[in-house]
Amino acid sequence: MSHHLVAVSDLRFTYPDGTAALQGVTFTLHHGESVGLVGANGAGKSTLLLHLAGVLVPGHGAVRVGDCPVTPRTLAQVRRTVGMVFQDPDDQLFMPTVEDDVGFGPANLGLPADEVAARVAAALERVGALHLRRRPPHRLSGGEKRAVAIASVLAMSPDVLVMDEPSSNLDPRSRRRLIEQLRAFEHTKIVATHDLDLVLDVCARTIVLSGGRVVADGQTRELLADDGVLAPSGLERPLRLQGCPRCGA
Amino acid sequence: METSRIETALGGLGSLDELAARDTPAARLDPRAKVAVTVAFVAVVASFGRTELGRLAPLAAIPLALGALGDVPWRPVLVRLALASPLALGVAVFEPFLDRAPAVVLGGVTVSRGDVAFLVILAKFALSLGAALLLVATTRFDDVCQAAGRLGAPRVLVAQLSLTWRYLFVLGDEATRMLRAHALRSPGAPRPRLRTAGTLLGQLLVRATSRAERIHVAMRCRGFDGRLPARETWRFRRADAAFLGGAAAVLVAARALDVPALVGAALSGVLR
């Protein structure tokens, strides 16, 4: 296997209504890296993520995952490698019970029933949701739904975790728990979010998107303290890197 | 207010389903047996003629037994029957006017064949819908879907049914939020006018469609190929055989023999 896991080169994409969402995006992800993808609303974050999972087909340029380019033919392989956690857990949890939902992916991989059950238990355990296994997903709280959505992807043992706004709509404690879990995952991660404090905690590297282009790519600690990069992209420093509101220091 | 009515209706729908999560003898029965019995039951109920009121009576034994085995509270079932009854009443209400031929004389009052037909329609409605409600109250809805699939219902239909059940609540929530948002900005008329209602409904359709697309994408990302994977493995046990055998005996007897007439004959024999 090559040393980089995900390679995106000169990716361009225009929606049918004429919105040019991506205008030449290039970057590579290496094994075990954890990358924050930040940018204003409409900067192209979600569109980029959908390309990584092979949901959208590039208008120009290419995406490679592992050893293969993402094309309609390699989709099965790509989706085994890339696990995508969607922004709204209700879109992701469609089976009647939590354990059926988490088992959906492994069952589609053709695994035998006992292996599916073992993976379901392990994935739910990992996100602290084992006790929810018999519950219907639509009756869970927001934080529980998010945990189960993440478990449903972990159960497929992906190499890369792709997450769209994982901390949106979470209460502070659920958010903190999510951050702890994300830090513990050994997977390669790419997290699109407006929660820059989460990026500071989870991701060593940050990519800033603006107007469908990569405007900065570097160490999170440096980038998120650089107002020259943040302000033009519609972002501000994470709270922890802002001055003290009392003393101004 | 309109919004709260949707919430109550959907909440009620869910509460019947929640009854099925309890551990009762009826809930432990094999879902396939319960689905098969319910389908056969509805078919037998429908098979009786428009004035065969008495012959329907013994059939009530099956839903009564299932309800007792499932420890189902009767009130929610009766309330739902009452809620749906206008449909049956609408169909039945003309019968007494269409057929005035006398059927029986009870205590000096002549009951026409139309009157009997009216009661037969209501009885058929109550028995069939009652049986379906009891099935849902004793069997988790996804088990009903899956059992129907195992018994030969088309795969697409089964997938549709179980996804509809899953997203009914999401759609309800969406509708509730829209109506609430509408009501808050039109204090004088909390109910949408026809024009606005059309827009709201269209909006709901568009939202439902785009959600369906997102769900489809999420499913494909996890390897969906058009088939929902089979889940539970059920074992057909002795209790299931007993339930199936008992129900079959009642259905066959009700269909083949005129039970009320036999009972009547036996009683008059005793009295004589």
Image: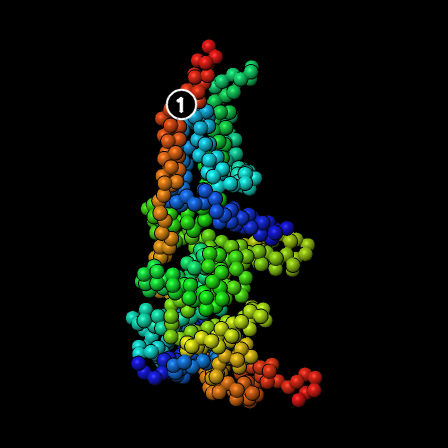
Q: Which color mode does the image show?
A: rainbow
- Pick whichever, B229 or B201, lies toward us: B229
On the image, the x and y values in percent for residue B63 come to 46, 36
Q: Single out the residue that lies furthest toward the right.
A: A246
- Mark 1, secondary structure of its residue: loop
Residue A105: image x %, image y %? 38, 64
* Image: A206 above or below A129: below
Indicate left or right for A180 with B221 as reference.
right
Chain letter of the residue beneath label 1 in the structure image: B
Which residue is at a point 58% across and 49% down the rendered structure image? Answer: B8
Quarter of the image with the C terminus of chain A in it? bottom right
Q: Nearer the viewer, residue B26 or B118?
A: B26
Q: Please report the residue visible at 41 percent of the width from the left and 43 percent of the height from the top.
A: B29
Evaluate whether residue A124 shows in this view: yes
In this view, the residue farthest toward the front is: B238
Q: Please, what is the three-letter code of the amino acid marked with disc 1?
A: Asp
Residue, far top = B272
Res. A114 image quadrant: bottom left
The residue where tag 1 is placed is: B258
Q: Residue A242's x, y, as percent?
A: 62, 85
Give A197 or B189, whichever is nearer the viewer.
A197
Task: Tell me the residue at 38%/68% (across/down).
Answer: A156
The image quadrant where one finds the N terminus of chain A is bottom left
Left or right of A80 in this view: B101: right
The answer to whether A59 is drawn above or below residue B241 in the figure is below
Does A85 sit left or right of A3 as displayed? Answer: right
Q: Position of residue A162 (x, y in %)?
A: 43, 74
Task: Write the residue at 36% across / 35% down.
Answer: B245
Look at the picture and state if B116 lies above or below B82: above
